[in-house]
Amino acid sequence: MQTTEKTSSLVITDGIMPMDHRSRVKSLESPSPRRRRLAEEGQVNLCVKYTIFSVNVIFWIVGGAVLAIGIWGMVEKRNLSSGVARLTNVDNSVLAVVMDPMLIFVVVGLLIFLLSFCACLGSLRENTCLLSFFSYSLVFIFVVEIAGGVLVYIYKDSIEQALGKGFRTAIVRYIEDSDLQFIVDEIQMGLKCCGSQTYTDWNENRYFNCSSPSARACGVPHSCCLSASASYTQEMVLNTQCGFHAISMKQDEARDRIYVRGCQSSIVEWINNNMYLIGGVFVGAVILQIMALCFARKMINDIELIKAYW
């Protein structure tokens, strides 16, 4: 007499698995004895599961912090009087959002937050939909990175010109945007440069323009001064006037007070000199993505193998 044992919705007769379920198991990669035993017990590889969860919890927290900083920065600047002045013109308001460095924080933070959340919840709940979304997103990001690297190599001259144009735009918005001001100052002090092509580019800023009634007229920011110590008085108070009237000087005369080399060429030179470092960071990021993708696919296969035994 035949004995029938019900496991979930699957009916196994005399310990023999029906043909349709056996075909589902065979359609998966050939499992090892240990994986087959875990699948029969309805259990995924716990090491893979909790590695995905624990690592992505860290990224989830980091992504949330980056997103919060970006949103706080954008909202805070909109509450300033300079933000109100920008919103009086539609084109300027759009430009303010696009050129806002905090927008990068928002986009990157949101991307990390969403992907790590899907990985955490997908691994914890053993949800193949969330894990598949996570893995396919990693593949998409990987393809975008490779395509971006190829495009940068092909159109490096156009990108260099766009870099110079972006820096000139930052010069124009130097006073209105505190984040751009910080970035420009750090670049000029770090790379010992001033302006985009040359120090006279600061004439494009309405506050540093020679026709401006401002006290900064015909001047450059203190970050253009020859050294960090030159920007401070003997009492270690920031001397913001060290670059005053520098634009009206001839280049040989200005060279004794400020950096006269443009930042566009300095940035390109820095990138060329640190190509191995940049490449190492890129390769490291790619390796992390490949490892995350392999772990996610491994867990998805384990879940599918378990389903095949239901």
Image (tube, rainbow, N blue to C red):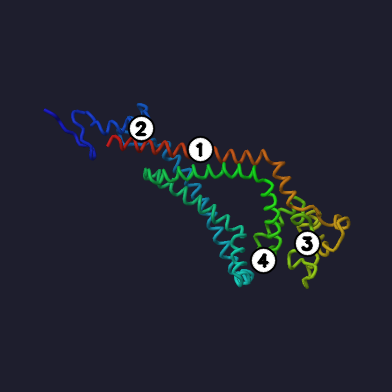
Q: Amino acid at mark 3?
A: Val
Image point (88%, 57%), residue name:
253
Residue position marked by numbered label 1 in the rendering: 290
Rounded to the nearest whole Å, what is the CA distance between mark 3 and mark 1?
Answer: 47 Å
Which of the two discs, 3 and 1, labels the residue nearer the N terminus? Answer: 3
Classify the position of the N terminus by image quarter.
top left
Mark 2 highlights which residue? Answer: 28
Tag in front: 1 or 2: 2
Side of 127 relative to 252 (left or right)? left
Under circle 3, the secondary element is loop
The local secondary structure at tag 1 comes to helix
Earlier along the polypeptide chain: callout 4 or callout 2? Answer: 2
* Amino acid, disc 2: Leu
What x and y, as percent, mark residue 158? 67, 49
Query: Which residue is the site of mark 3?
Result: 220
CA distance separating discs 3 and 4: 16 Å
Amino acid identity at mark 4: Glu
Of the residues shown, which amino acid type is indicated by label 1? Ile
Q: Answer few, some or many: residues within 10 Å of disc 1's Cα (few below 14, many 20 plus, some between 14 and 19).
A: some
Q: Earlier in the sequence, mark 1 or mark 2?
A: 2
Cα separation, mark 1 vs mark 2, equals: 21 Å
Name the residue beneath numbered marker 4.
176
The quarter of the picture where the C terminus appears is top left
Nearer the observer: mark 3 or 2; the answer is 2
Q: CA distance from mark 3 to mark 2?
A: 67 Å
Does 142 appear above or below 244?
A: above
Counting other residues with Cα less than 10 Å from the Cα at mark 3, is it few (<14), some (14-19), or many (20 or more)? Answer: many
Residue 80 located left or right of residue 210: left
